[in-house]
Image (tube, rainbow, N blue to C red):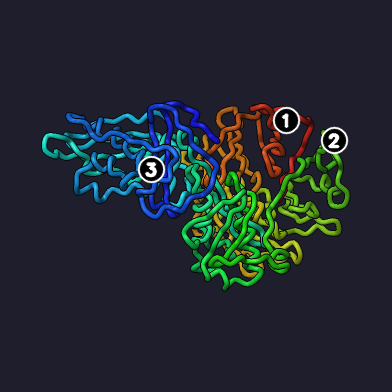
Amino acid sequence: MMRASRCGAAVRAARAVRWGALAALLALAGCATIPSSGPVAAGLSDLTQAEQQVQYTPPGPVAGATQEDLVQGFLYAATSPSDDYSVAREFLTAEYAAQWDPSFGVLVFEGGRPFRSDGDTAGVLSLSAVAKVDAQGSMLPVQPGASTEMRFEFERVGEEWRISSAPAGVILDSSTFTEIWSSHQLYFVGPGNVLVPETRWYPNRPSLATELVAALLEGPGEPLAQVVTSGFPAGTELVGNSVQVDEGTARIDLSGAMLEAGPLATGSARAQLRATLQSVRGVSGVELFVDGAPLRETPEGEGGAPRQVGQLSDPVVLIGEEFGPIVSGELRPLDGFGATVAGFDPLAITLSPGGQSAAMLDPDGVTLLEDDRALPVDDRPELLPPSFDLLGYVWTVSAAEPAVLRVTGSSDGGAAEIPAPWLSGREVAAVRVSPDGARIAALVAGDGGSQVLVAGVIRDENGVPVGTTQEAEVQLWAAGAPVDLDWMGQLRFATLTREGGASKVTFAGPGQFASPQGSVPQGVELSGGGGRTQLRVLSADGGLFAPQSGGWQSTEDDVALLAKRG
């Protein structure tokens, strides 16, 4: 059981299966215990079923309240969704009370929330916003800089002020938000029959399993809707609008539309459910039913089920004439193509996911290296380090023309050009395909610092890349000039930016908060390695640094090149 970590500052959010209700708990007196396990009750069918283990009874407006008092009281009153936020609506005029929409989403901010008057009948709440969460739980960061201003308007009702206009949704400070909300992943089926996660944010409460399954049945959001598929036939719904958890097993009863799925699709659906519910405390297994009848597993369905992507790897470096992984502090030179790397005078190397080949950037362009051949794949000017995807395609981009990506098949050397309009006119430092092949990220310069843009990778029925989504989402705003980028698994990426004389490392990811990781002296390159413990940063003087105890520890000297994987 999780206990609120800050007395007098707890937040609670109530939400129906599709965010039919949204409540935020702001500054509350006393400590509250917030259960994070237990049986799942029926999904909310109306706003009167708050499903909260702790109920809050904030006061309504007091006589003689100022406009600022009304705004702060209104935010506090939104902690209670009881009777369709009846207390919060007491702060509003009768006309606006019928219009205000608390289910719009959450604005997450840091620091204070000063209020200032704007004339006699309006006021502004100034916030340092860091992220926005929409009604489906998808999060995007907010560009740092100017304050986000939330405008309120007021009217006299008799002798008292009331709010006649207010922002839709709820406002939470970041520390409170992360105390009682958590990120979870919905899993869909991507290229190569692998599971692809989509991060969503949910309040920590017993109905979490129900909400996750319902969201999974609704399908992916943009831009993954163009990229992934699902084993659930269209129209599949939860029977009874609820997922029951019995002794660790989630019992999921689906509507008859599920019977339209064949064995392979059913196997995919079952794998999606298992992966999606693995983060829910108290759930260790899944049982599927259709209109109350068990849906049995079949060898065909289980054998063809999508797999999880795992990509932990030891750092691979070039020291002198030797190229290979560092295992337990010892360089182990690779045979085959690895023995030829030093002779090319490489500028950057990316290994294929399985390590059987490499894409190398040298002064002449990008070359595909295998044990029995060296195949030139791109000779355009100003090429950036290449990237591999999980199906073996080599991705290359020229900084001189970043809006045109070149994709080369490793089996036949056939190349195609893919437009990436979201990179047009950008100053690009690095482009990397995610380990599951569903997303492509680019570290670019912009607005006085750096950004990471993430787009979806669109493929044909054979997995051949044919395009990217027309638009990309900014998933990170970072200070400093862009230097390098790499994925650290499916959920996160790491960036290296330079501000003054410091090279700063930042972790982030689609739908995740940014997490600064300190500085590495003269950092010029990084490799994600599939996880934080495998992450390495190379400095300009050949030092290899690994994260350790909140800082960075030098592990090797005289490293000429740090390879990436995938």
Res 436 quadrant in image: bottom right
Where does label 2 land, which residue? 330
Badge 3 marks a residue whose secondary structure is loop
Query: Image point 17% across, 29% down: which residue?
Result: 64
Count neighbours of disc 1 (C-alpha within 10 A) and say few if under 14, some if 14 to 19, many if 20 or more: some
**Disc 2 to disc 3, C-alpha distance:** 54 Å
Q: Is residue 42 left or right of residue 516?
A: left
Q: Residues within 10 Å of mark 3 (few under 14, many from 20)?
A: many
The mark that comes first in sequence, 2 or 3, is 3
Measuring from the top left, give residue 7's x and y in whole percent: 44, 26
Q: Label 1 vs label 2: CA separation?
A: 20 Å
Residue 541: assigned label:
1
The residue drawn where x is 44% and y is 28% is 31
Between 472 and 34, the one lying in front of the other is 34
Disc 2 element: strand
Mark nearest the camera among 3 and 1 is 3
The disc at residue 530 is none
- Marks 2 & 3, CB-CB < 8 Å contact: no
Q: Amino acid at mark 2?
A: Glu
Residue ID for mark 3: 23
Q: Amino acid at mark 1?
A: Asp
Q: Is residue 451 in view?
A: no
Q: Between 565 and 163, which is closer to the camera in this rendering?
A: 163
Q: Amino acid at mark 3?
A: Ala
Q: Point out the frontmost of discs 2 and 3.
A: 3
Q: Which structural element holds mark 1?
A: loop
